[in-house]
């Protein structure tokens, strides 16, 4: 079985790329070689009992990236870490998005862009066709580019919200599959549009978690599987699920 840690890893960079949004680069050849887009790591934050899960946002030869929003005590602690400090984490955890020779439309909303950046890199390396949409309040300072970068404040070429443009983009790009990560209302909306247009859709859920390792049932939820309801754990069977199987609350 693959070694999931805990690992104590050196932080190489930890920089603010938008208001209260940080990008951390960590050293680990093991995670860089083994991670799949959609998987996450769970970080120990000072003396907090519960680790905090963050999606892997990309890998290089011996490093991997995280992109996170400062939300509460755990992420405040992470944002204060400096290059040279150590992060204690387990991973890579969970499943990943399907990677097949299909035409993809990738959508990342806010920090939900993290697994989408990683998926985009992998599709590019494999020569699989894709287009991407990034939706933000304000543009992030990264080297990543999107086919469509939509910002609420107009700091990119397209001003507005995802729902102002999505149906037109789908009509012109004609994807076989949509992969999305973002807030639940956005994923629910996109799932509805995808299913209406007979497009396969995979969503990465970022619900509340406790242990992150499949033992506490803190992330349990019901999904639809073959006409029946089934109980699954986001951290175990997920975080990526078929949009059509999700029961949106
Ligand atoms: C699979 C997955 C991937 C994710 N990827 C990303 C990502 O790439 N980028 C990103 O910005 N965010 C991501 N998130 C969300 C991120 O994990 C949360 O924003 C983060 O945990 C916030 O931690 P906090 O301590 O700052 O906030 P808090 O609000 O203080 O705590 C976060 C959550 O931890 C739980 N918690 C805290 N204290 C307790 C306690 N004492 N007892 C029980 N539960 C407690 C609660 O459920 C709470 O909602 C992801 C979440 C999941 C599940
Ligand atoms: S967070 Fe404990 S089972 Fe998923």
Image (cartoon, grey):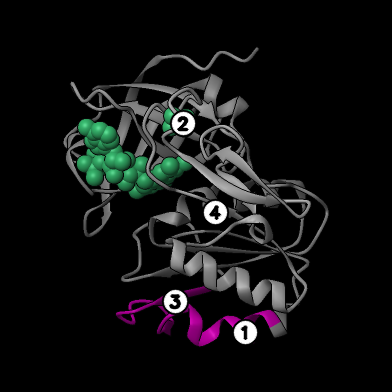
Q: Camera-side residue: 139 or 103?
A: 103
Q: Where is residue 92 in the image (x, y as percent from the top left)?
A: 53, 27
The Cα–Cα distance between marks 3 and 2, rounded to whole angstroms, is 36 Å
Is disc 3 placed on a helix, strand or loop?
strand
Q: Residues within 10 Å of mark 1 (few under 14, many from 20)?
A: some
- The quarter of the picture where the N terminus appears is top right
Q: Position of residue 74 (x, y in %)?
A: 22, 36
- Say which mark, if any, is on residue 116: 4
Q: Is residue 143 visible?
A: no
Magenta segment includes 175:
no
Q: Mark 2 points at which residue?
A: 217
68 above or below 136? above
Picture quadrant of ligand 1: top left
Which one is earlier in the sequence, the residue at label 3 or at label 2?
Answer: 3
Q: Name the residue under label 3.
A: 150
The Cα–Cα distance between marks 1 and 4, rounded to whole angstroms, is 20 Å
Q: Camera-side residue: 200 or 5?
A: 200
Is disc 1 placed on a helix, strand or loop?
helix
């Amino acid at each position: 079985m693959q070694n999931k840690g805990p690992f104590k890893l050196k932080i190489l960079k930890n920089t603010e790329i938008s208001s209260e949004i940080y990008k951390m680069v960590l050293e680990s050849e093991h995670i860089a070689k083994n991670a799949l887009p959609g998987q996450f790591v769970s970080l120990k934050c000072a003396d907090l009992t519960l680790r905090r899960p963050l999606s892997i946002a990309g890998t290089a030869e011996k490093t991997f990236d995280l992109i996170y929003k400062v939300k509460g005590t755990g992420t405040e602690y992470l944002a204060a870490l400096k290059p040279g400090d150590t992060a204690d984490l387990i991973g890579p955890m969970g499943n990943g998005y399907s990677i097949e020779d299909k035409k993809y439309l990738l959508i990342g909303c806010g920090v939900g862009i993290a697994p989408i950046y990683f998926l985009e890199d992998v599709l590019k390396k494999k020569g699989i066709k894709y287009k991407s949409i990034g939706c933000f309040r304000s543009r992030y300072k990264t080297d990543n580019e999107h086919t469509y970068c939509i910002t609420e404040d107009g700091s990119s070429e397209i001003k507005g919200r995802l729902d102002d443009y999505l149906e037109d983009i789908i009509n012109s790009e004609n994807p076989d599959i949509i992969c999305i990560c973002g807030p639940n209302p956005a994923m629910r909306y996109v799932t509805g549009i995808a299913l209406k247009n007979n497009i396969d859709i995979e969503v990465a859920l970022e619900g509340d978690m406790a242990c992150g390792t499949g033992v506490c049932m803190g992330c349990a939820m019901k999904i639809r599987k073959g006409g029946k309801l089934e109980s699954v754990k986001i951290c175990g069977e997920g975080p990526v699920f078929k949009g059509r199987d999700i029961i949106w609350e």
